[in-house]
Image (spheres, rainbow, N blue to C red):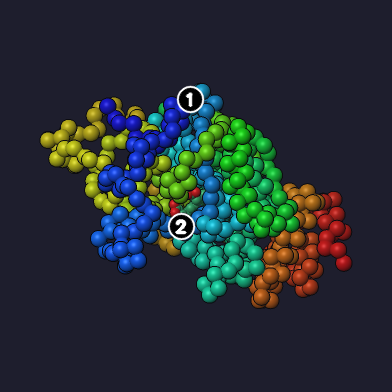
């Protein structure tokens, strides 16, 4: 008999929510004493000073004074929705995770979409990466897929995360601007740390200005390891494909919308779901053999700045996500939800991607501060829908009243050993991957040194109009940099990506186009390339 610990939304019964604090017909204090007046403080006569003994006044104001919690250090601005994930059963040969394995199995989910760089009150339509984080409340425990709408990341090693975020968030002196606009520090960072060039071009492309959260792809970015019932493993990348297709705003629309309706994406998601136009995505997997090299077609699967082209590894659909319920309370659900890459279920495991490894530390750590202590897994939106039986005790905001005297195992007083025979089949067990005998070093694999070839691949895959938008975006954003040496350094990066791109942006900035410092692959200029040269920028 585990108690039902889920969010009491009333959705199942159609009844209105009866959250703690909203019971009974009368207004009360937080202690349940019925109130007669909440509009006047207790004074020494109608014109007298307010009395310190007014405990209702102090309770009301004190609680108000503490209503805000810190915003997320990144991804502060977001919107969320509840939904259902239905498995196609097509991953049954790849993973033992029940929510993916069993055909037709339904799992409740909560998704939070976000921008990365702006504060909680910032505009939705800025040029930025978008977060796409999904909490699967599976009956084997909670699985979090904490992804973005772009398949690559700025850095290869999590130790550089504070650096890229310091460079990309507001200037320390004026606290402006946000996102990639008008930003010397951002361009300084990405032109010095050239591994960031791939993600930067995704940001400069139309993908950086999504039209709607409903029209974005999602990517787990890292490579994960799946294990099936037979103990066999594969390496995979997770993909979300939106039913409505991928659509973007044009830059002028995005700028106007940021002023006219800064809540554009938040409103769009809420309105669509309330109108019954439930957004849908297919979850898919790119599947790679689990070899000791952890590469596929020469691409290092542990390098989060690289994709594996879908032509080489097609995305195989494994299930469908439908978002069908808006939050009842934004703070309780969208603000308090806490995602973590360590929230894994049997059948899904991590790899040694150094960015993923660092994230495994960072999310729980930041949430200890953001959600004030170690018990935020008890907040309704974060409660698993699987039975929980842990030995975690006490701490700030402890809501459970734990019985028993022996929160340690094995014990001879309270149920003894929690791991009876047979448990291993149902438990989360790390894949016993061999850890290579190697010296301790602060170094990357050599394959991580290629910073430009996939950026070129991305550029060459664009249509003429998409290329034009990319050139305009680089020209606009670099045009806002105060420091000429930063613009010139970024132009040298563009020269290593593509001569036409570099020439056109240089022309727009009124600067000479530099020569590449690496050897570019010989490729005939495609019609798309030569057209771009004629179209933009106009002389
Ligand atoms: C938050 C994605 C890299 C630290 C988030 C969120 C997403 C996300 C979607 C918002 C979660 C929400 O809606 O609540 C990613 C992706 C990454 C990445 C796809 C790379 C592939 C990193 C790295 C670090 C990091 C390398 C640190 C080493 C954080 C922190 C938060 C966050 C501290 C705030 C979490 C909270 O306050 O609950 N990230 N991130 N991220 N990320 Fe990342």
Q: Quadrant of the C terminus?
A: bottom right
Residue 164: x and y in percent read 53, 63
- Residue at 78%, 56% (x, y): give it: 468
Q: Is residue 160 visible?
A: no
The answer to which of 29 and 530 lies nearer the viewer is 29
- Residue at 72%, 60% (x, y): give it: 473
**Residue that badge 2 annotates:** 71
**Residue that badge 1 annotates:** 105
- Residue at 24%, 29% (x, y): give it: 420
Residue 347: x and y in percent read 43, 34
Residue that lies at the very extreme toward the top in this rendered image = 103
Q: Quadrant of the N terminus?
A: top left
- Residue at 48%, 36% (x, y): give it: 109
Q: Quadrant of residue 252?
A: bottom right
User: In terms of secondary structure, where does tag 2 sit?
Assistant: loop
Q: Please, is residue 64 above or below residue 328 in the view?
A: below
The answer to which of 3 and 434 lies nearer the viewer is 3
Q: Earlier in the sequence, mark 2 or mark 1?
A: 2
User: In terms of secondary structure, where does tag 1 sit?
Assistant: loop
């Amino acid at each position: 008999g585990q108690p039902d610990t889920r969010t009491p939304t009333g959705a199942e019964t159609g009844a209105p929510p009866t959250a703690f604090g909203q019971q009974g017909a009368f207004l009360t204090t937080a202690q349940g004493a019925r109130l007669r007046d909440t509009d006047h403080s207790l004074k020494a006569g109608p014109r007298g000073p307010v009395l310190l003994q007014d405990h209702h006044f102090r309770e009301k104001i004190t609680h108000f004074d503490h209503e805000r919690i810190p915003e997320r250090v990144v991804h502060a601005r977001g919107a969320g929705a509840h939904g259902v994930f239905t498995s196609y059963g097509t991953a049954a040969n790849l993973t033992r995770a029940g929510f993916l394995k069993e055909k037709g199995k339904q799992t409740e989910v909560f998704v939070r979409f976000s921008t990365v760089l702006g504060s909680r009150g910032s505009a939705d339509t800025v040029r930025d990466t978008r977060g796409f984080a999904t909490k699967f409340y599976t009956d084997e425990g909670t699985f979090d897929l904490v992804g973005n709408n772009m398949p690559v990341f700025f850095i290869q090693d999590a130790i550089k995360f504070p650096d890229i975020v310091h460079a990309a968030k507001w200037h320390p002196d004026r606290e402006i601007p946000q996102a990639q606009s008008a930003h010397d520090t951002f361009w300084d960072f990405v032109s010095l740390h050239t591994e960031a060039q791939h993600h930067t071009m995704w940001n400069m492309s139309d993908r950086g200005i999504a039209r709607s959260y409903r029209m974005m792809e999602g990517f787990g970015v890292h490579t994960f390891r799946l294990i099936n019932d037979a103990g066999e493993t594969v390496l995979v990348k997770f993909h979300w494909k939106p039913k409505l297709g991928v659509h973007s705003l044009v830059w002028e629309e995005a700028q106007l919308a940021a002023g006219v309706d800064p809540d554009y994406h938040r409103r769009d998601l809420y309105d669509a779901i309330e109108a019954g136009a439930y957004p849908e995505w297919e979850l898919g997997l790119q599947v790679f053999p689990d070899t000791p090299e952890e590469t596929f077609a020469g691409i290092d699967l542990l390098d989060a700045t690289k994709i594996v082209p879908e032509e080489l590894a097609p995305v195989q659909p494994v299930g469908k996500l439908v978002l069908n319920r808006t939050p009842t309370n934004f703070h309780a659900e969208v603000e308090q939800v806490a995602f973590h890459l360590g929230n894994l279920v049997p059948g899904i495991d991590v790899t040694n991607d150094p960015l993923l490894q660092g994230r495994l530390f960072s999310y729980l750590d930041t949430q200890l501060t953001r959600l004030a202590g170690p018990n935020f897994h008890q907040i309704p939106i974060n409660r698993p829908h699987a039975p929980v039986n842990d030995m975690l005790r006490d701490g700030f905001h402890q809501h459970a009243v734990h019985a028993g005297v022996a929160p340690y195992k094995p014990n001879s007083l309270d149920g003894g050993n929690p791991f009876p025979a047979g448990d291993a089949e149902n438990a989360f067990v790390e894949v016993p991957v061999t850890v290579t005998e190697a010296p301790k070093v602060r170094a990357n694999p050599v394959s991580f040194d290629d910073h430009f070839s996939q950026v070129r691949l991305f550029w060459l895959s664009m249509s003429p109009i998409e290329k034009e938008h990319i050139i305009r975006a680089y020209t606009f954003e670099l045009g806002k940099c105060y420091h000429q040496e930063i613009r010139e350094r970024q132009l040298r990066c563009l020269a290593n990506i593509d001569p036409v791109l570099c020439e056109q942006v240089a022309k727009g900035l009124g600067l000479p186009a530099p020569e590449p410092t690496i050897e570019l692959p010989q490729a005939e200029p495609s019609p798309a390339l030569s057209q771009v040269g004629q179209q933009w920028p106009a002389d």
